[in-house]
């Protein structure tokens, strides 16, 4: 499975960006897709997840109401729409996919993910 993330860039506070994560390869056993981010000097954190079957979503409190995760089954692509961006959203954003069942319904733990994209940098200026 290969994941290609794109859509990062420089945006002013209050602006919007949409990240995309295109999956290729043996993708038919996916359970969930996740978006994580890592800011300079900080640990990587889970931002949003979406279960591939059913489409249930999870959002970190810090992005709830501003970010939306969605999927396009036909394109094997997951999106992260980011609105009302804040300087504290500045980070490298990674997409990841889990190929296993987990009792963690929303797949918020990064240890549950088997394949990762290369990361895309989002910079929000104040």
Image (cartoon, rainbow, N blue to C red):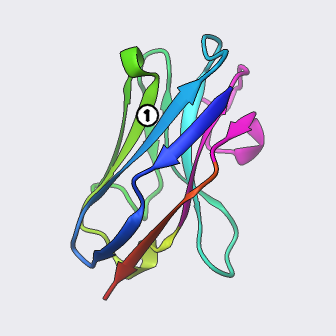
Q: Is residue 48 covered in magenta?
A: no
Q: Nearer the viewer, residue 117 or 114?
A: 117
Between 38 and 121, the residue placed more toward the observer is: 121
Residue pictured at 62% horizontal, 43% vertical:
108
Q: Is residue 110 above or below residue 93?
A: above
- In the image, taking residue 9 as reference, residue 112 lies left or right, namely right
In the rendered view, does 76 fall on the left or right side of 119?
left
Write down the quadrant of residue 102 in the picture: top right
Q: Helix or strand or loop: what does disc 1 sit on?
A: strand
Query: Which of the 4 image quarters holds residue 109?
Result: top right
Left or right of residue 116, residue 65 in this image: left
Q: Is residue 125 above or below residue 19?
A: below
Q: Which residue is mark 1?
A: 78
Q: Residue at x 34, y 84 (%)?
A: 125
Q: Dot 1, crowdedness within 10 Å: few (<14), some or many (≥20)?
A: many
> Relative to the observer, which residue lies in front, 89 or 118?
118
Q: Residue furthest bottom?
A: 126
Residue drawn at (48%, 15%) of the image: 53
**Which quadrant is the N terminus positioned in?**
top right
Left or right: where 56 falls relative to 43? left
- Would residue 113 be visible to someone looking at this image? no
Q: Position of residue 25 (x, y in %)?
A: 64, 19
What x and y, as percent, mark residue 44?
A: 66, 62
Image position of 36 with respect to 86: above or below: above
The location of residue 112, given as percent across then percent down, is 74, 36
Where does residue 15 sit, x and y in percent of width and height?
Answer: 22, 69
Q: For the C terminus, give its image quadrant.
A: bottom left
Q: Residue at x 43, y 34 (%)?
A: 78
The magenta region covers 92-117
């Amino acid at each position: 499975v290969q994941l290609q993330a794109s859509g990062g860039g420089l945006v002013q506070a209050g602006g919007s960006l949409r990240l995309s994560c295109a999956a290729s390869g043996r993708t038919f056993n996916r359970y969930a897709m996740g978006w994580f981010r890592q800011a300079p000097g900080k640990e990587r954190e889970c931002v949003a997840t979406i279960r591939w079957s059913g489409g249930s979503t999870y959002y970190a409190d810090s992005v709830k109401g501003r970010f939306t995760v969605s999927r396009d089954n036909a394109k094997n692509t997951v999106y992260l729409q980011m609105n009302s961006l804040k300087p504290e959203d500045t980070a490298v954003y990674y997409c990841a996919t889990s190929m296993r069942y987990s009792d963690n319904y929303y797949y918020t733990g990064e240890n549950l993910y088997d394949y990762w994209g290369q990361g895309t940098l989002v910079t929000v200026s104040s």
